[in-house]
Image (spheres, coloured by chain):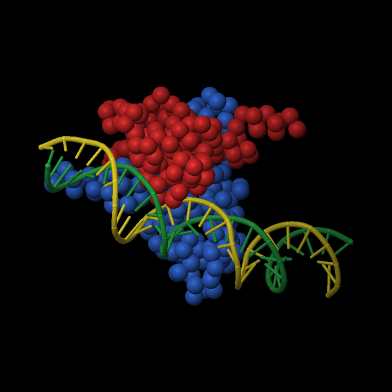
Chain colours: A red, B blue, C green, D yellow
Amino acid sequence: MTQCCEHHPPEEQLTRNQRLVLDALRSEDGPLTAYNLLDRLRDEGLRAPPQIYRALEKLVETGIVHRLESRNAFVSCNHAHCGGQGVLFAVCDDCGSIEELRTDAIDAALRSTTEAIGFHAHRLAGEVRGVCRPCGLKKTAS
Amino acid sequence: MTQCCEHHPPEEQLTRNQRLVLDALRSEDGPLTAYNLLDRLRDEGLRAPPQIYRALEKLVETGIVHRLESRNAFVSCNHAHCGGQGVLFAVCDDCGSIEELRTDAIDAALRSTTEAIGFHAHRLAGEVRGVCRPCGLKKTAS
DNA sequence: TGAAAACTGTTATAATATAACATAACGGTT
DNA sequence: AACCGTTATGTTATATTATAACAGTTTTCA
């Protein structure tokens, strides 16, 4: 959706707090809540929620980090993409694991849906609940 | 996704609290938070958060009510559909209005995306942020 | 170099959601 | 009708998530 990467601030010019939060998220494979981050970063000088939330706000805005709405948690984006196009997560109801999906395949259909009502779409935030492959296999095995 | 309506409890057999919450949501055109509902239903005897949350949980489970994740709020479903298939909201970043969209157009593409990773999808919860038609018109006018 | 803007640290508090527990109603058997 | 397991209820207390407000500092850039 619209040209990419121009609004995407090069990572080098993140502030110290933004960098700390981003690195903490990257070093974790799953999502972290704001308070999880606070715990991990207290030693670096981040002692109060607003410091975390402010950093997250910027990171999410630029798309480097995504918010996992259904869990009030945050994940660093593992796609090569730049900000703006949105996200889609596959969330396993059994084990809680999450996987980020590309939205390419649904973008066109989505656009036609929103255009039908004259809505000008900017970005998608979606979560698909279901059962991930490993959990699916476990079930059929038993 | 799978046959509809069989898991959908007839509305007549909702409990009193579920009925109260559902009616309150229906009589409102926009989303309401749990505490909004609590305020409106205190006179009917709903005095504590768990009473509201418990009713909401069931209603959301069956798909009669949707949760608007980005706002921690709830809306009654205005489609003729039955539970299970998921929701897609168009959320206006300017005026905050929301509109529920049918997911028909994206279901196929979505399915192929999830199947590609062996994920068995149950239901989608999506929100598209952007600018609604009225706000779009206002902008081009100015 | 100086003014606007953005980021920081801090305290306090708001808003959202759940745990835990005792009681009551319901639904389906014998 | 009496039983029993399940589900819903009302309640208190508390956990979790998020923001308001304010004073001070750094960054940006004209």
- Which image quadrant: the N terminus of chain B? top right
Estimate the x, y position of residue B59 in percent, counting from the top left.
Answer: 54, 55
Give me the residue at 28% from left, 44% from top.
Answer: B131
Estimate the x, y position of residue A6 in percent, counting from the top left.
Answer: 27, 28
Estimate the x, y position of residue A67 in percent, counting from the top left.
Answer: 44, 41
Estimate the x, y position of residue A120 in percent, counting from the top left.
Answer: 28, 39
Give me the residue at 24% from left, 48% from top.
Answer: B135
Q: Is residue D5 left or right of residue B130?
A: right
Q: Is residue A24 visible?
A: yes
Give me the residue at 53% from left, 33% from top.
Answer: A28
The image shows a total of numbered marks equal to 0
- Nearer to us in this view, B105 or B129: B129
Q: Is residue B112 left or right of residue D8?
A: left
- Nearer to us in this view, C15 or A16: A16
**B36 lies above or below B132:** below
Q: Is residue B103 visible?
A: no
Q: Quadrant of residue B9?
A: bottom right
Give me the residue at 52% from left, 50% from top.
Answer: B63
**B82 lies above or below A107:** below
